[in-house]
Amino acid sequence: MTRITTPALLRSRLPAVSLALLSSAQLAHAQAAAPADTTRKKLSLEEVVVSASRVEESFLQSPVTVEKLSARALRLTPAPSFFDAVEHLKGVQVITPSLGFKVINARGFVNTTNVRFAQLVDGIDNQAPHIGGPIGNVLGPSDLDIEEVEVVPGTASALYGLNAINGLANFSTRNPFRSAGLSVQQKVGINHLGDAATGARAYSETSLRYARVLVADKLAVKVNGTLLRGYDWVAHDPTDLNPAGNASVGLLGADNPARDPVNSYGNESSDRSNFALLSSPNPQSTKTYQVARTGYDEQALVDYTLRTLKADAALHYRPKPATELSYTYRVAGFDNVYQRSNRFRLQGYVLQQHAVQLLTPVVQARAYFTQENTGRSYNLRSMGENLDRNFKPDDQWKRDFTAAWNAAVRAGQPVAQAQAVARAAADAGRYQPGTALFGQKLGELQDINNWDVGAALRVRAALAHAEAQVNLAEALRRGGRPFPARLDLLAGADHRTYVVVPDGNYFINPNPGKDPLADNLTYSKTGGFVQAGGRLLADKLRLTATLRADKNNYFDVKFNPRCTAVFSPTQRQNFRLSYQTGYRFPSLFEGFSNVNSGQVKRIGGLRVMSDGVFENSYLRSSIDAFTKAVTDAANANTSTTLTPAQKTQLAVEQHKNLLVKNPYTYLRPEHIRSLELGYKAALGPSGRLLADVDFYYNAYRDFIAQVEAYVPQTSGGEPIASTDLSTVATALSTRAGQARYRLWTNSQTQVYNYGGSLGLRYELPGGYLAGANTTYTRLDRTATSDGLEDGFNTPRWAYNLSLANENAYRNFGFGLNYRWQQGYYSQTFLVNGEVAAYYTLDAQLSYAAPAAGLRFKLGASNVLNQYYVSYLGGPSVGGLYYLSMTYALPHAAN
């Protein structure tokens, strides 16, 4: 017998409408295969998943790796929320840009805006449209409304398309027909213990859920609301990103006038330039020094107060048994910190979503509309840069700095002291954090939607999505037509359109014949799939084949096949094999961004946005090497007959061959090929031990990443079309001769990565649940590596150990989870370097009073308060200690 998901077991765990999604052939087969004793309660045999194949199937027999948090697991977790608990699953990596914004990823290539991993709520994408990914769980369910979580750690593009090439997470909420009543939950807590910079801060989260069946088996409603308040984790990495900026003149460390601390903004590469300054009282001792504006630490620019207010309301209608129609409205307003290439303060940000779903045994259909308004959010880097420039323009600051430096050197002061004197003189009267004037100017720049002079993020965007899938096999059977019971046939189609209101800073409409500022920008994609499957060898072998096609406005049709096989020699042992491919089309930001940021124009990689730039630009990395060589050579030239300008021009001619023409071109979709092997089994005489092991091998090409390249220009700002390298080098040797661009493009390297994971879960006597899992992830670069592939940003090894019991002694329970991950190399556009290995211990103690409908949980994430960073440039994360009280009052059935 291979079919272990019996109707009796399914009915004990699934809503009626979900059960109805099983075909009549599947039910008949399950009944025939069911053992006489269906009273077993081993979770490994009862659990069902839907994300792996878009139809319900046994957890043990899923054709690809699926990780799951059941309702019981969510009660046992010591994590502060169900969303935090996802990190304890095998094969899953979570990074923390903010206390209110965590990013889920699997199998490598994680970044702070993970557009390669889809996040769904009841099958509905909850991304912020212009970002292309979700902002944590701000538009997702509360702990009171979560039913279970499924994570597919691996490409799922063949069935889900869009941005699921690294996997997806689906959060299932509680159906009001099955869970009517009133629930209230209050969490209070504290974080920043031992943080001298902030002191201890309070944390509070209040949630309410109310569901009621208005007409028995016909009409039901539910309402949820959550208010979260706290103080965000702080980013304060002082590491200098430009330590060798003045090495040729011996100014290092704190004496370096071009220092660029990681979490200080306004002193980046575009905010520094070369100054001709005296190195001794001798008038002929002029040398070239690299000098940056002073900038501001992140803590001066951002209010770390965290706030999320979200709510949802749903109406569910069952016109007949096994058919359910629902409408859901979700809204969230929030303040927190977000990170892309730069860090942002999201303030007054609002997301709204309207969704309609129809679920029947034959048809599943969804349509939803998501709106986004960034409110009064702002860019921290632009804020730091433009506070400095608002106080004093760059040219004036340079003149003041130069005069004070040279005066100090002529007076006999060493250059290290002269640079401190010069900075103090040039910064005299500068806006000081904590003063009324500083707050006034910050507020003014927060409302200026031009990053050359202000910092506002003002985006209004939306997405409209519609999809449907039909169980063709079930439709044929219900229509009275013969269709083999051992065959399955499924088909689906979807369409998505993004709509952006141009703001003139972040987005314009670049399409010919459109007004760049008046006409909305639209970006659409249409796709569909067909999936066929069958069971062979007395139902021990299940084969499935899927073919998907997707078409985007700017690209030809892309096909994604998937083939899977599951071999079940016994009902408790299952071997799986799958091969699939996936494409990812560029997100809105990657394709259409149009931002002036710190005197660098960041533009989308579609030809409609960047026509001509790729062909005429030179790599910034080569320009940096060229500029350094020119500066070092000019400073080393001891000639007394040449002027500083002549020394520089001679060095330019000597080192012009260091310049490298931009080899990259316009965006293409990303592509992945993935092979996966796995084994899952319920072992032991009673199946108490669940074992799951998987191994995968991925091949990626056309990674979408960023490259910085500069176009040579005249002093009047006109591009230089000359192919003469001397002319180009002379222009690029000065800031005025550079038109600076940051471009979205594709890596020229094909990259391979591989890995695997092992998970064990054991049901001990007395209700104890023990678990252990480990994950191995390895990057294998090819010899043609061009250095542009997106950062892997993933530890090679990570593991979790857990032990829990819901009722260890007289309604007291506990949960423990220890997580360790190896250090890894972090590569982002903000900073590259090593992230140290770290571990966390999460713990909780619970007490349930069933008669009173009360449950208490005292717990902590990172209970040992060992501060760590999950990626470079991000905040330091410490312990969060909480006490939660949940009150549930069931509603009497009508």
Image (cartoon, helix red, strand yellow):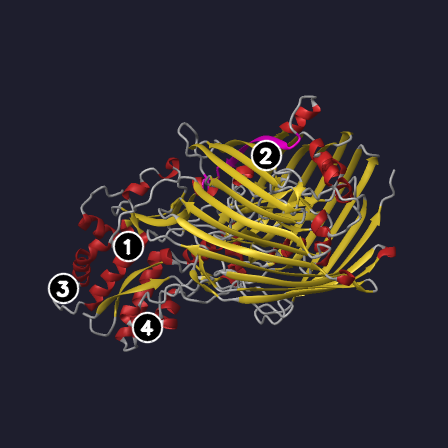
- On residue 623, the disc is 1
Real-space CA distance between mark 4 and mark 3, rounded to the nearest whole angstrom: 25 Å
User: Of residues 529 and 377, which is closer to you in this image?
Assistant: 529
> Within 10 Å of the Cα at label 4, are there few (<14), some (14-19), or many (20+) other Cα atoms?
many
Residue 736 locus on image (x, y percent): 28, 51
The residue identified by callout 2 is: 533
- On residue 218, the disc is none
Q: In terms of secondary structure, what is the magenta stretch mainly?
A: strand
Q: Which of the two discs, 3 and 1, sits closer to the camera?
A: 1
User: Of residues 525 and 573, which is closer to you in this image?
Assistant: 573
Is the C-beta separation of discs 3 and 1 under 8 Å?
no
Q: Which secondary structure, mark 4?
A: helix
Region in magenta: 485-507
Tag 1: amino acid = Ile
Is the C-beta separation of discs 3 and 2 under 8 Å?
no
Magenta span has 494?
A: yes
- Point out the image quarter for the N terminus: top right
Tag 2: amino acid = Gly
Q: Earlier in the sequence, mark 4 or mark 3?
A: 4
Q: Earlier in the sequence, mark 1 or mark 2?
A: 2
Q: Which secondary structure, mark 2?
A: strand
Residue drawn at x 50%, y 48% is 456
Q: Residue furthest bottom?
A: 412
The residue identified by callout 4 is: 418
Q: Earlier in the sequence, mark 1 or mark 4?
A: 4
Residue 217 locus on image (x, y percent): 81, 34
Residue drawn at x 36%, y 58% is 269
Residue 266 locus on image (x, y percent): 42, 58
